[in-house]
Amino acid sequence: MHTIAFVFWAALAGLLGQQPASPPGAQASLDYQFFKTRIQPIFVTKRPGHARCVSCHAGPAAARLPLALQALPRGSATWTEEDSRKNFAAVQRVVLAGNLNSTLLLHALAEEAGGDFFHSGGKHFNSQGDPEWQTLKAWVMGQTESSAR
């Protein structure tokens, strides 16, 4: 019985350690309007030396990835309302509101700037001072469209 209890507690500790909780008292939530108007455009922005995020993270090939966005409608640079809602749900799988260790913030950030080691699409942001990274961070930390104005 002690072995089962030990395995249970060890597994629980491992799961809790994967994505640290928000600081005590934090009440961050993810604002849909901010996502739609400020975050989604980041996914379609072309950066020198990199593919756009949607090149790998949208469409049928992306279904196996932790972040799978909807394919852009043919000939369009933006998503429909329905697809934006689906994207919002998809992105929430790689974001824990109020947590700077969210995968969305760390995967495309250079390791020397605090990012994690893996992102097969490259490191799109060289520093935490990058304006787009700052926008991602603001959203993850709970900034809303109305507070951004």
Image (cartoon, rainbow, N blue to C red):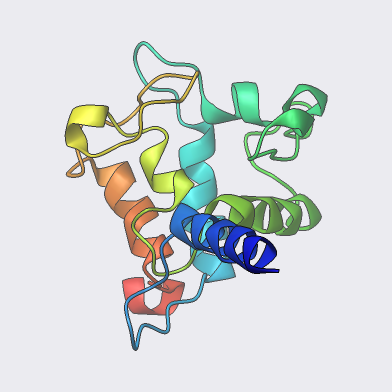
Of all residues, the one furthest to the bottom in this rendering is: 25
Image location of residue 147, percent across then percent down: 35, 78
* Above or below: residue 96 compared with residue 67: below
Q: How many marks?
A: 0
* Above or below: residue 50 compared with residue 44: above
Q: The N terminus lies in which quarter of the figure?
A: bottom right
* Above or below: residue 48 compared with residue 15: above
* Above or below: residue 64 compared with residue 79: above
Whether residue 149 is visible: no
Give me the residue at 50% from left, 62% from top.
13
- Is 114 situated left or right of 22 in this image? left
Most foreground residue, 36 or 120? 120
Image location of residue 16, percent across then percent down: 50, 63
Q: The C terminus lies in which quarter of the figure?
A: bottom left
Of all residues, the one furthest to the top in this rendering is: 49
Give me the residue at 25% from left, 45% from top.
131
Image location of residue 125, percent across then percent down: 29, 31
Give me the residue at 35% from left, 34% from top.
116
Give me the residue at 46% from left, 57% from top.
19
Image location of residue 9, percent across then percent down: 56, 66
